Amino acid sequence: MRPRLLTYSLRSLWARRTTSFSTALGIAFLVFVLCASQMLAIGIQDTMLSAGSDDKALVLQHSTGTESESKLPQSVLGVVAAAPGVRRDENGQSLVTGEVVAHTMLASTKVPDLVSTVQIRGVAGNVFRLRPEVHVNEGRPIRSGTSEALVGRGLRGRYAGLELGQNLELAAGRPIRIVGVLESDGSAYESELWVDLETAQSSLDLQATLSSVTARLSDPSAFEAFEATLGADKETGLAVWRERFYYEQISGGLGAVVVILGGILGVIFSLGAMLGALLALHASVEQRLPEIGVLRALGFQRRSILVSFLTESVALALVGAALGVGMSMLTPLFDFSTTNFSTNQDVTFRFQPQPGVVIIAATVALLAGLLGGALPAIRAARLDPVQAMRAGAS
Amino acid sequence: MHTSQLIFRGTLRAPVRTLVTVLTVGIMLSAFLFPRALVRAQRQQIEEAEANRIVVQPRRGWGSPLPARYADELRARDGVRIAAGIRWAGFKVPGKEDTFFASFGAEVGPFLDMCDHQLVAPLPQREAFLADPQGAMLSHDLARKLGWKLGDHVIVQSWQAPGEWALNVRSLYEPHHAEWSRNALWLHWDHLNRNLPSELQEQMSSISLELFDGSRSAEAAQAIDLSYDASPARTLTLQDRVNLVALIGRFQAILAALDGVSYMILVVVLSIFGNTLAMNTRARAREFGVMRAIGFSSGWIAGLVLAEAALIGLAGGALALAIAYPLLQGVVGPLLEESMSFPPLSIPIDLALSCLGAGCLLAIASAGWPAYRITRLSVAESLGRVT
């Protein structure tokens, strides 16, 4: 039977379990930081992008970057409805909707003294036909022409007045009642307050004004013709966006900041984990010099010794990675609300677990373990058996 | 041999191990520093708040305007000592578009009355800035970044609107308890306003008020909002402190996450120290035995171990500062400043000291157990351990 060193490696990790555990913990934190920051970046993208789709087009005022900055006359709705490429319903009606988007500052109910910016969307009666992914889960939809509102799941209860059944004033003395809760699979709409269009227009002093017109296209390729027609009319000064592209634009900045911060922390934690593994393995070799000498004297090859110590570091990395992944899988339990500085609006994001992220993080952990283990393992393998056995007795 | 020499040489007994430890701890603690710097910046904002100052903003949120006439109306109110309207200018310097800075058109007279104790500049410069309608006032830091000197004539453009503004650099200031102004430029509101497209004229982004009686700021804020309730541009008036909290508080979750990470770092550092220091003392058990045998007390030796640890920790903390400083000033700070309008980040002296202290304390804490073990061993045991 060929003697095996695998159990030896694992037992020696167990024999130094405090050291082993703390090293694995360092690696676990590395994996956690990498996973969590990537999951958040992906979550930000998902939240924003799932609000937009390829077969919808967004019409804004020319040279404005966000819906809340854009001002269009109500008449644009008719212009867009008549444009080529717009899908029609069974009654021959164009699937277009005009909306007013504005912000209001509300006091947080969670963080004392905090005032945040909440996005309000004044929606027309046909909004759910254009955004079928949004639905009212609790309460009921708003009735057209009434002072009623739907609150996004992500905002609900977090700001003053934004709980089902509560009232909110956009204009003094005109309470708007929250009658339902919006859900749309985590998209950015869940961080909005939807109010009846006319109520929004009159309360926000935006009579006969729209911020955007959204059109459902007959298919994604119809966008070119649609854009060519509307964009060409310099008189009206319209900017035409693919809805998905618009949401990409307004989510890019925040996503980038999370990726950069996560990246910097990731590099630092990688170095820390690698050097931590190096120190732990180095200690482990130092302590076991006589043992290694005996193993060599018993006939174990240099290669076996090398592999044995590398196995130890890989085992440490694997334990650490498992721990880190486990920790990061808890993050989706928490909502992450922050201001999207592209639009200045408070948005609730979720951490989005993905296999790719976990695999990358685990690979980095494994590499850190291997690199950290390499030097001590090479040193152990190159020991002279006689000197090693005497090392303890010097 | 002096004790200090003994300590120093002790740390270099296993030079590679010590160096790797210092390196690791340095790197990790640098990552500890930058979340702390953010949290510090947030706290500092709050400390910088002026008790008798309130800020009137559009209830529609940042970016939507207040009519310029509000400034005059507010100035005329009872209890208001000064009212200064400010409009965000969004300037960029042609050819240096990558250099981000905050820029504002202000009603300069009242603005300086209110803030000259915070933006400290020589009196003649201040007078020159006030007297020149095209005058600009900026921080020393920003002037250095842009390569501008007093008396320079410069042209700037805006990200918000077409057009150009000619400015004369009239005053360079140093912020005093006002980190928000460390990377900023100010010009006369009239000058900014005149060159803007007509639909963007006569607007203020916010109006700062100084009250005669700071103790009544909450009531005053409420009264102001109430009086503009019926108008299209409703206001949200916040006490300076609340306003500053809100500015950074928008990113509370990011701050909290980074804060959490900074504690993880401490745990990792503790474990790395623990490893190294336990190993150091283990390797030197015999040496300590000899020292005991020739008359050093076990307490003295434990002290030696702790002192060596403290020295290693101090070195790690110092390295962390050396790494974090350029990282924060060069990468993280500008990123957060530009995208999230954070105040410019820095590592103030007390934060630097606390980093050194953290290194030291963590090292001492993790050396505690090995040191204790030494005191428990008898001389014979520690000598015998290695035979």
Image (tube, rainbow, N blue to C red):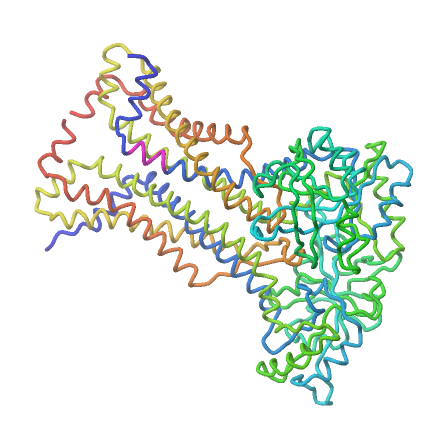
What are the residue bounds of the magenta stretch?
B17-23
Q: Is residue A306 left or right of residue A177?
A: left
Q: Where does residue B31 sit, x and y in percent of width and height?
A: 46, 41
* Residue B56, quarter of picture: top right
Which quadrant is the N terminus of chain B positioned in? top left
Near-viewer residue (B243 or B377): B243
Q: Where does residue B201 sit, x and y in percent of width and height?
A: 80, 55
Residue at screen point 74% across, 65% down: A101
Q: Is residue B179 left or right of residue B133?
A: left
* Residue B152, quarter of picture: top right
Which quadrant is the C terminus of chain B positioned in? top left
Q: Where does residue B160 sit, x and y in percent of width and height?
A: 69, 57
> Relative to residue A393, is residue B131 depicted above or below?
below
Q: Main secondary structure of the magenta part?
A: helix
Q: Where does residue B335 sit, x and y in percent of width and height?
A: 55, 49
Near-viewer residue (B238 or A77): A77
